Amino acid sequence: MDKYLKETEFINYSSSVVQNIISKLNLDDLDEVEKAKKLFNYVRDATKYSIKGVSLEPDSFKASFTL
């Protein structure tokens, strides 16, 4: 399972942007499943998608840029 949870260039969850979002979501008292649900819902609801103005630059695909 650890290989699926590793940070990558694009899943950069240690960035300050992502860490600030995580701290605002108050995940401390939740079990792993509830944390995953809350994070999934946040990303689903907070990420705006538009085909207009899409950048193909690699940095635009990072979690810290998208969120």
Image: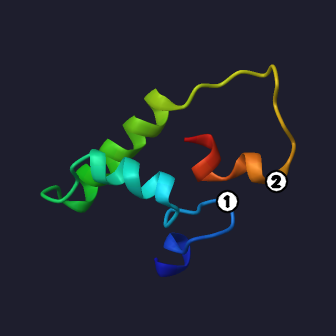
In this view, 1 is above or below 13: below
Disc 1 element: loop
Dot 1 crowding, Cα within 10 Å, few <14, some 14–19, many 20+? some
Q: Are marks 2 and 1 in contact (CB under 8 Å)?
A: yes
The number of discs equals: 2
State the image quarter where residue 50 is shown. top right
Q: Which residue in the protein does label 2 denote?
A: 58
Measured from the top left, where is residue 28 in percent x and y?
18, 59
Horizontal side, residue 39 vs residue 8: left or right: left
Q: Which residue in the protein does label 1 denote?
A: 10
Dot 2 crowding, Cα within 10 Å, few <14, some 14–19, many 20+? few
Along the viewing direction, whichever of 48 and 17 lies nearer the viewer:
17
| Quarter of the picture holding the C terminus | top right
Measured from the top left, where is residue 30 in percent x and y?
16, 55
Horizontal side, residue 6 vs residue 34: left or right: right
In this view, 65 is above or below 2: above
Tell me what residue is drawn at x 39 percent, y 37 percent.
Answer: 42
User: How far separated are the C-alphas under marks 2 and 1?
Assistant: 8 Å
In the image, what residue type sits under mark 1?
A: Phe
Tell me what residue is drawn at x 47 percent, y 80 percent.
Answer: 2
Measured from the top left, where is residue 20 in percent x and y?
39, 52
